[in-house]
Image (cartoon, coloured by chain):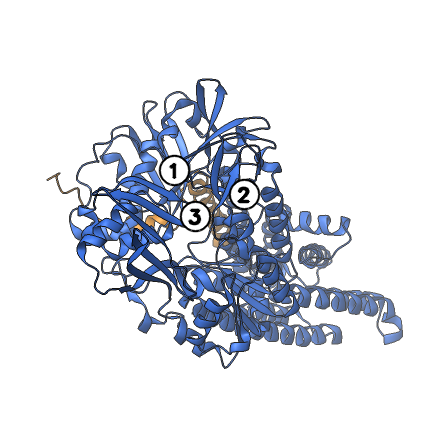
Amino acid sequence: MNVILLMIPVSLLLAGTFLFLFLRTLSSGQLDDLETPAHRILMDHERKDQK
Amino acid sequence: MNPHPTASLTLCLQCGAPTSPGRNYCCSACEWLASDEWIKELPARGTPEKWRPYDDRQIWKNYDQSRSPESLKFHLHVAGLQCSSCVHLLEKLPEYDPAIREVRVRYGESDLFLEMNPVGRPGWVASLIEEMGYEPHFLLPSEDGAELQEEEDRGLLRRIAVAGACSGNIMLFTVPIYAGLAGSWKDLFNLIGLLLFLPILLYSAVPFYKGAWAALRTGRINVDLPLTVAMLGGFVASTWNFLRGSDFLYFDSTAGFLFLILVSRWFLRKSHRHWTKPEERLPWTQEIYQVRVSTNLIRGKILSQLKEDDVVQLSRQDVVPADGVLTSPHAVFSTALNSGEPFPRTFQQGQKILGGYQLLSDEAVMTLAKSPQESEMAKAWKMAQKEALYKGRRLSLFDQASQVLLGVVLTLGLLVLVAAPWLGLTWEDGFQRALALWIVACPCALAFGGPLAYAMALRKASKNGILIKSADVFDRLPQVKNIAFDKTGTLTEGRLRLVETHPSPLPPFWKSLILGLEKDSYHPVAHAFREAWPEHLNDTKSVEQVHEVMGSKVFGIFDHKLYSLQASPKESDALVIELRHDQKVLAEMEFEDILRPEAATLLQDLSPRYDLYLLSGDKPSRAARLGESLPLAAKNVFGGLSPSDKAAFIEAKSETLMIGDGANDGPAFAKAAVSIAMSGALEQSLRLADVYFIRSGLLSLKDLLQIGASVQKTVHRNLFFALGYNVIAGAFALAGFMNPLIAALLMPLSSALILLSTWEGSR
C-alpha cells in the first residue's frame, strides 16, 4: 500500500498543475473570445496584388 | 426539430450562411470575396462628411481608450456582421493602411477593437468600414463596460475552474470508498475530500452567498438561497459526520452539483449579456453636432457635451438632439419618430421643436432649451426601457418551482427534527434524517435544469438570427393566443416601389426628366424612381431651378418649360404621382408598399393556431386592401391607429404577441406578452422589444415559435425528472433508507438525466 503514499501527492500535483495552467490562459485573455478565432481560421484569402 | 426552413431560405454562395430571400450572398464581405475584385487598394479619397468630425482631435479624444500618447485605441460596435468573411475582411484592414496597427473583431458581440498610430484618422477608418457594408459606431469609454464585463467573466470562469478541478478530484478519492475501502485509508481519503471541498466552499460558491444575503435583506427568496443552504448544510453535515466517523459524507455530490450550476449560469450569462442594464445612449440622435461657439466659430461637439443654451447648426438629415427653439427663419422637419405622423411639417422661427425631429430642409439653427438626456423623447424612452427591463425580470417557471420545493423540503426537515420523539426516533436519528433530506432533495436538478435549457435555446435562437432579451420569453411564448402584425416594414417591405405607369412604358425622355427633378430629393418616392430606372441614372436631364415643396411637390425648369411632380388629387388607395407640364398631366405613376413574399404563406401556417391581427397607422382603406390579399379576417384588420391606440388594443387583448418595426410600436411592445422588433428598425425598438430579428423577413417568426415549443417541451421534461427525483429521494431520506451509496448514486444520476434531456431537447 505504500505506493499510494506516492500516488496521492502526484495526483494532486497533477490536478493542481492543470488548474494553474488553465488559470494562466484565463488571465492572459485567451478565453475572452471563443467565437471569433473559429471564424478567423476559415479564411486564407491573400491580397490579390501580393504574390 | 430543425428550425431552419431550408426550403424557403437561400444560402450564401460564398460561405453557406442563410441569406435573406432573393439574395445570393449573406453580406457585402462575401460578395466582395467572391467577386475577385475586393479592395486591392484603398479608395484615394478623403473622409466623407459624415465621418470627418471623427478625424478631429477634439472629437476623437473623447472616444480614445488607450490613455497613452503612443497609440489610439477605439472600441466600435459594428452592426451587420454575418459570417467569417466579415471577420476576415475587417481584420485585413491594417494591410491597407500603415496607420492602422490592429483590428480585432469580436464576432459574438459585434465589437471591433481598433488600434491606430497617433497620426491616424479614426473617422476615415470608420468610413471604410461603412463602405464595406457595416454600420460602425464609436463607443465612449463610459458606455463601454467591456472591460468590466470581461473581468466579471474571468472571475466566474476562475470559480468554475476551481470548482471543476476540486469536484473532479473529490470524485476520484470517493470512488475507492464506495468500492469498499476501509480503515485508516478511508479516513485519509475522506480527509482529502474535505480539504478539496474547502476551495469550493470558500471561493467558488461565494456569489451564491452574496445573492442569498442580498435576497434575505430585501425579504425575498431567490434561487441562491436554497443553493447556499445546500452548500453550507452539505459541508456542516459531512464534516460533522466525518469527525464522528459516520458514513454520511456528501462532499462529492455537493461539489459536483455546485460545479454544474456554475457552468449553467455561465451559459446563461453568455447568452444575454447585452441586456442587463438600461442604456444611456439615445439611439435616434447622432453623436456629433455642430455647435456655434461664437459668431463665426463652429465646433463639433459630441452629444454628451451638449447642454442648455447651446446653439446648434443642423444640416439636412440631422436629427434634433434635444428640445429647443428654432432660431433660423423656417425649416421642414419629419416628426415621424415622435408622433408617427408620416408627413413633413414646417416650423417657423421661435417655434418649439423636439429632440427626435429630423431636418428635411437644407439648414436650420436652433437653441437648446434642455440637455439631450432631459428631453421629452429621452424621458419617454427611459421609462419604456425600465418597463421592458422590469418585464424581463419576472420569475421563471423553474424559479417558482424551486421556491416551492425549497419551502416544502425545509419545512418537512424541520418537522422531522422537531417531531422525532413522537415518530419513535432518537434526536440524533431525526437530525440525521432531516439533514439527509435537505441535502439529497435540494433543488439542484431544478437549479440548473431550467437555466441550461433556456441557455441552449437562446444560443440556438441567436444562431438563427434571433436575439432574445431574456429567457423568460420562453415562458411567455406558449401562452400567446393572438399575433398582431404591424403593416409597414413588417408585413410589407417598408419602402415604396413603382408598380404601374400610365402610359406604359414611359418614354425614356420622361424617365430622365423625372430623375432630374428628383435628383436631390430624399423623399421615398425619389428613391423609388431611382430604384425603378437604374439604367437612366447616368443620363438624367439637368433640370434647373428645382424646388421641392416638402411633402407635396417638386418643380423645375427644363428646356424653358416648367415641369412638376405631385401627388394625384384623385381619391385612391395607392399613392399616385403625376408628371405635369402647364397643368396638363403627362404621366401617372402608381406606387405601392410591396408585401413581403413570405407573408401570405406564413400567415396561412399560423392561422389555425393563433388569431391574427393587422394593426396599422396607415389609412384604413390601405390597411383593408392589404388585409384582403392575406389570410386575415376583415374584422381583424385595423387602420388609422396611433401608437397609443395600438398599445390600448394590445392591452385589451391579453396574451398577444406584437411584431412590429420602428419606434412607434414601442408603447404597444410594452403591453404585449411578447414583442418582436423586425430588422431595419431603430436600435431603440430592440431595447423595447423582447426579441429582435437580425435577418430581414418574417421567417424568423416561425423559427422562434418552433424553438419556443421545443424549449417548453425540454423544460417540462426536466421539471418532471427533477420533481420525480426529489420526491423519491426525499421519501428515502425521510424513511431513513438513505445510505451513502444510494445518495452517491442518486445525485449524479439525476444530474446526468437532466443534462441528457436538455441536450436531447436542444439538438
Q: Which of marks 3 and 2 is nearer the N terminus?
A: 3
CA gap between label 1 and label 2 equals: 19 Å
Question: Is residue B205 something one can see in this rendering?
Answer: no
- Chain ID for label 1? B
Amino acid type shown at disc 2: Glu
Residue position for label 1: B113
Which is more foreground, mark 3 or mark 2?
3
Q: Chain A colour?
A: orange
Q: Chain B colour?
A: blue
CA gap between label 1 and label 3 equals: 11 Å
Q: Is residue B113 found left or right of B535 in the rendered image?
A: right
**Whether label 1 touches label 2, CB < 8 Å:** no
Which is more foreground, mark 1 or mark 2?
1
Q: Nearer the viewer, residue B256 or B58?
A: B58
Q: Earlier in the sequence, mark 1 or mark 2?
A: 1
Label 2 crowd (10 A; few <14 / some 14-19 / many >=20): few
Q: Up-down: is A15 above or below B746?
A: above
Secondary element at tag 3: loop
Q: Which of B266 and B420 is in front in this view?
A: B266
Residue position for label 2: B152
Q: Residue at the right extreme? A: B422
